[in-house]
Image (tube, grey):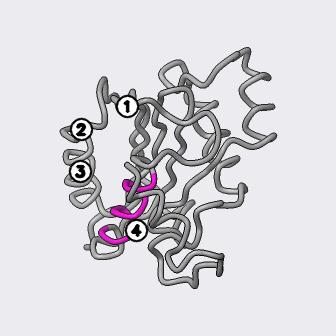
Amino acid sequence: MSEPIIRLTYASRATFKTAQQGVESEVARILLQSRRNNPKHAIGGVLHVADGHFFQCLEGKRTRVNDTFSRIASDPRHQDVQILSLEPVTERMFGQWSMKYSAAEKNLDALLKRYGFESFDPFRFNQDMITEFLQACASNKDPMANVGDNQPVAANDSPRPWWKRLLKRG
């Protein structure tokens, strides 16, 4: 019998100042590292960062997700790490992504407002909101889709892609 697939969703607070617009260099580093390491362990998921909070979903075999989550919980870029939900699943929501990045978009803002949130605070999410937020993230475009995932990076005026310049600044 094969090991079950689980979906673990957690929230944490960033120990660094998060960008109000665009992608902060630490977040870009996390995405690059996740997209390099997660395929080796058949882990996928989504990451959303806003208002100083991380919201992340990890999907994969239980032992691999647990190992990955343990590393995240001890990562100095995170504090107050709290599991929001943990459930067995028969189908992955983010199977095509080693780590999708979900930026702030109108559908996420509308969802937060519908639940009475003035700012992003995933520690206050109930199970229905977690599910709806994950579905909204799944439908969002990933503005960082070409970072670290073997897809071609769009050409620009610099000899290095924009995200590599961003990483060098941090």
Task: Estimate the spatial distance between the alpha carbons at disc 2 and disc 4, rounded to whole Å.
Answer: 18 Å
Give the mark, 2 or 3, whose residue is nearer the N terminus: 3
Give the mark, 1 or 2, whose residue is nearer the N terminus: 1
Callout 2 touching callout 3 (CB < 8 Å):
no
Task: Estimate the spatial distance between the alpha carbons at disc 1 and disc 2, rounded to whole Å.
Answer: 15 Å
Q: Residues within 10 Å of mark 2 (few under 14, many from 20)?
A: some
The amino acid type of the residue labelled 1 equals: Phe
Which range is magenta?
Answer: 28-37
The amino acid type of the residue labelled 4 equals: Arg
Is residue 29 part of the magenta span, yes or no?
A: yes
What residue does disc 4 label?
Answer: 35
Q: Residue at x 30, y 37 (%)?
A: 77
Q: Nearer the viewer, residue 73 or 159?
A: 159
Task: Estimate the spatial distance between the alpha carbons at disc 2 and disc 3, rounded to whole Å.
Answer: 10 Å
Q: Secondary structure at mark 3?
A: helix
Residue 95 vertical placement versus 23 (above, below)? below
Callout 1 touching callout 2 (CB < 8 Å):
no
Give the mark, 2 or 4, whose residue is nearer the N terminus: 4
What residue does disc 1 label?
Answer: 16
Q: Secondary structure at mark 2?
A: helix
Q: Quadrant of residue 73?
A: top left
What residue does disc 2 label?
Answer: 73
